[in-house]
Image (spheres, rainbow, N blue to C red):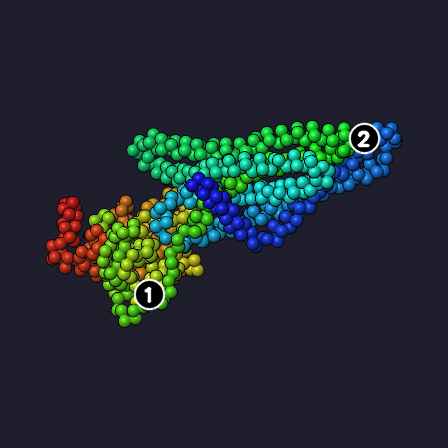
Amino acid sequence: MQMTKKNTDEKNIWKTMHRLLSYSKGSSWLLGITIILTIAGTIMQVLSPKILGKATTLLFATVTKQQAIEFQKLQQILLIVGLLYLGKFITDFFQETLMTVVAQKITQKLRNDLKQKTNQLSSSYFDQHTNGNLMSIAINDIDNIATMLQQNLVELVSSSILAIGIIGIMLTISWQLTLVASIIIPLSTLVTKIFTPKTQSNFRAYLKTQGTLNGKIEETFTGQEVIKSFSNEKQALNAFDHMNHTMYESGWKSKFYGGSMMPAMLFLKNIIYVVVIILGALQVTASKLTIGNLQAFLQYSTQFSRPISQFSQIWNGFLSTIASAERVFAVLDAKEVTVFSDANFPTNVAENAEICFDHVQFGYSPGKLLMKDFSLHVNEGELVAIVGQTGAGKTTLVNLLQRFYEISGGSIRIRGNDIRNFSHQELHKKIGMVLQETWLFSGSIYDNIQYGNPAASMQEVVNAAKMAYVDDFVTKLPDGYMTILNEETSNISQGQKQLITIARAFLANPEILILDEATSNVDTRTERLIQQAMKNLLVGRTSFVIAHRLSTIYDAHKIVVMQQGDVVETGSHNELLTQKGVYNELYQSQYDSAL
């Protein structure tokens, strides 16, 4: 069983590496030049010791035979060696430069694919994965891939070519000594097989914990005020210490097992080197080998054992790269929101309702339905208020309309077309949202409003701002619409933030509007402005309002009362009060609390 797992891990390693290198297709010519330069540089490195050994043999023969030194021949040998060293420097310089370009191009494509992928994932994916972990994959893991590709890929190719070339040269000097020196290859393979599984598993654990820790840090920084107000600094620190310790454990183990390969290989190298010296000396004394060839062989033996011993370090970095690539590819392979063809979900042209929830079934977990048989018809231009206790399914309903989650049964149609036949872009152009929790990004007020329609002109932005009562306070700011909002958008009030999001929705001009009552935590005057801006926005649009205070939805065309994921009552305010049902209970409870 253990052997099967090891074989599977090895297959996965090479499968992941092959997929990673497939990202170099656009830069294959650069990679090809890099490999050619690597081969050329390695050949120069291989030839240098043997040519230099001729100089040693020449000097040794001159001393033993007491002859004059042949300076011209010696100069020729040294000139050739010097040119080889210069050539090696040039090839190393250019291969390093080109490999840097290749590595950065690969990671640029990975980042682009990752960004595009996140736009295609459903909300359920983000419910199951923390922002900190996803940010760690997008930043730390991709940076790790870039660094390791740049440093280790060329080194791996160079070491392989160097080892093959040196074996060929050593065979021309002494096959017996070559056989002894080559014993390090199977021994090194054995060491690698012993340490690789533990190194790889700990690398995976380290990177996973790093993502979790990043998420915890982000959560802690965002909630500093809450943590301090409840005096929970100690609990937050304990949670951080626990994750930090877990990361430390997997980190030192991955480095220990990965780093242990090199000392083990150096030990084997030194033993074999001593044996080669002894056997080589015996061959020289028996006149079976010249002193120059022995010197060359010893140099080759050192060069041969160096890539073998360094292979452990390269392999260690390689495993780290694979662990990071696996995390990136796990996101890229995640299930996307499917866009179906019209043939799968035929249109209903005869349907009068603009929006139709037809026997919808939905559950966050398979087999556990929250909505068992939900039906609702909304006519064009109607204002539909959705009310219910916390957890009744109000937000779930509008999330399904926007296809943030996939329904388990039934269908949702807009003008007779199943929403699964629309692309996400097509669907979301039809729907606009103003949420209770405002979302603004760091940038100017103008940029935040224009986000609703990037093609809008300055005048269109200003007109939308006037409709949402944003223009009133923006024109009083020193920089007007070019006022920069800071990262926390704390340089404007909560009510002003909400008005900006309403202006953004005005500019987007959607067919369907979803409003989450957004008047909490604001003063009475700002609340009236927000409510009036929302009324302006609702004119002529089919709208859904998630109502928290029933006093704000008395004029709704239709009030949908939800309970445990299903519609229990539908009607106008007066009709529902007359029924003396769930809505009446909600109304009475809010009326009593107001008194």
Taking the spot 25% from the left edge, 47% from the top edge, the residue there is 524
Left or right relative to 531: residue 428: right
Judge the density around disc 2: few (<14), some (14-19), many (≥20) Cα neighbours within 10 Å.
Answer: some
Question: Circle 2 sits in a helix, a strand or a loop, which is it?
Answer: helix
The C terminus lies in quadrant = top left
Question: Circle 1 sits in a helix, a strand or a loop, which is it?
Answer: loop
**Three-letter amino acid code at disc 1?**
Phe
Q: Nearer the viewer, residue 339 or 400?
A: 339
Q: Nearer the viewer, residue 519 or 513?
A: 513
Kindly tell me whether residue 481 is visible in this rendering: no
Give the image quarter of residue 561. Answer: bottom left
**Three-letter amino acid code at disc 2?**
Phe
Q: Does the residue at mark 1 contact the one at mark 2 (Cβ under 8 Å)? A: no
* Residue receiving disc 1: 345
* Residue receiving disc 2: 60
Judge the density around disc 1: few (<14), some (14-19), many (≥20) Cα neighbours within 10 Å.
Answer: some
Q: Could you say where residue 348 lies in the image, as x and y percent from the top left?
A: 29, 69
Taking the spot 35% from the left edge, 51% from the top edge, the residue there is 123
Q: Could you say where residue 90 lies in the image, as x and y percent from the top left?
A: 69, 43
Depicted 156 relative to depicted 285: above or below: below
Q: Could you say where residue 256 lies in the image, as x and y percent from the top left?
A: 50, 32
Q: Nearer the viewer, residue 233 or 456?
A: 233
Left or right relative to 208: residue 290: right
Q: Could you say where residue 190 lies in the image, as x and y percent from the top left?
A: 54, 36
- Marks counted in the figure total 2
How far apart in space, not on screen, are marks 1 and 2 (Cα)? 89 Å
Taking the spot 36% from the left edge, 66% from the top edge, the residue there is 342
Taking the spot 76% from the left edge, 28% from the top edge, the residue there is 285
Kindly tell me whether residue 36 is visible in this rendering: yes
Left or right relative to 281: residue 12: left
Q: Which mark is residue 187?
A: none
Closest to the camera, between mark 1 and mark 2, is 2
